[in-house]
Image (tube, rainbow, N blue to C red):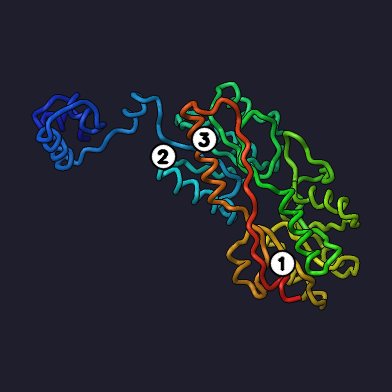
Amino acid sequence: MVTMEDVARAAGVSRKTVYNVLNNKGSMSEEVKARVLKSVKELNYKTSIVAQSLKTGKTNLIGVVLPDMYHPSYVSILHSIEMIARKKGYNIIACNYDYKAGLEEYYFDMLYKRNVDGIIYQPFILDNIDYDNRTNVLKAIDMGFPIVVIGEYTFDDTFSVVYLDTEKVMDDTFKYYFSKGFKKPCFIFTEYYEGLDYKTLRPYGYNQPRVYWYYKLCEKYNIEPQVCIHSNINNIYVKDIEEFLKRDTFDCIICETDYIAISLYQYYRNIGKKPLPLLGFDNAEYAIIFNPSITSYSPNYSLMAKKSVNILLDEIKGKVKEPINETVEFSFYPRESTENF
């Protein structure tokens, strides 16, 4: 492997001169600079990241810990974070903990050992929902380690958070249906947490805020809430959803995801009933090309990535004295599944 000493010998200068040229430090003639850079090119010298980190105390690496890199939402987030971080001189290590608490902890430990400068973290645990006792979180607190949390969850002021304005988007959903003359929306969702009280927003813990805000807005608008579970914690489809869709007690449907919205068309075919207007969340590609195309809400993932990266880099540089809370709103994409009524 070519070293800085090799470049210095080839250019006929000292190692310090090579270092100064590569880091744009000190003063030297243009002739010396050109000679050093020519030797760098001829020898194909690559700066050692390890050596740089030993000198600066920084690796210019960011860990990104996500629950699912197959889901289109998380793919969009990861793509935007990587692109923005790269433009700012940082590389990322992407970690998919697959909704498992043990795997999440493994990745946090790995990232600490790799000396990443900070972590962007989307929490979503299925097999351990007690956030306050998460080992990786407690360790980060003790270390004073820079972490920015992203997503729809509620936290105390321990970390900076970039969260989705779920209350507003659910209210916008109700108002959208009201503007089209529909008055009784139901909500269909996946049950991730068995036995969870969906009418309570758990502070500092895990919850399903879209379900929660559905209940709250039904109360606000004096509507009888009607909910149905599409699939359960083990991703097993619930058998009574077809019976639910036979009801005449609701006139429009809010789906927790675009995937649920699309699958409902199959259920309607099974029962031989004309589908009601329905919409989903995520603005996934399959929702756009499906026939009929699915009305959808989607967070501005690029803005979420930009805010989370900027906050994290400021924390790494010591510019953030108190945790920062930033919100990201949803964009709306009206399509055939609600517009053709």
Numbered badge on residue 90? 2
Q: Quadrant of residue 97?
A: top right
Disc nearer the start of the sequence (2/1): 2
Disc nearer the start of the sequence (3/1): 1
Residue 305, image x, y percentages: 53, 46
Please tell me which residue is depicted at 36% across the width and 25% down the height of the picture.
Answer: 56
Residue that mark 1 sits on: 263
Q: How crowded is mark 3: few (under 14 residues within 10 Å), some or many (20 or more)?
A: many
Q: How crowded is mark 1: few (under 14 residues within 10 Å), some or many (20 or more)?
A: few
Q: Which of 335 and 66 is in front in this view?
A: 335
Q: How many marks?
A: 3
Q: What residue type is labelled 3?
A: Leu
Tell me if 129 is positioned left or right of 122 in this view: right
Tell us which disc is closer to us: 2 or 1: 2
Residue 206, image x, y percentages: 73, 40
Q: Quadrant of residue 24?
A: top left
Marks 3 and 1 sit apart, C-alpha to C-alpha, by 38 Å
Marks 3 and 2 sit apart, C-alpha to C-alpha, by 11 Å
Numbered badge on residue 312? 3
Q: Which of 305 and 12 is in front in this view?
A: 305
Q: Which amino acid does label 2 sit on?
A: Tyr
Please tell me which residue is depicted at 58% across the width and 56% down the height of the picture.
Answer: 72
Tell me if 280 is positioned left or right of 59 in this view: right
Residue 325, image x, y percentages: 63, 36
Q: Residues within 10 Å of mark 2 (few under 14, many from 20)?
A: some
Vertically, is 338 above or below 331? Answer: below
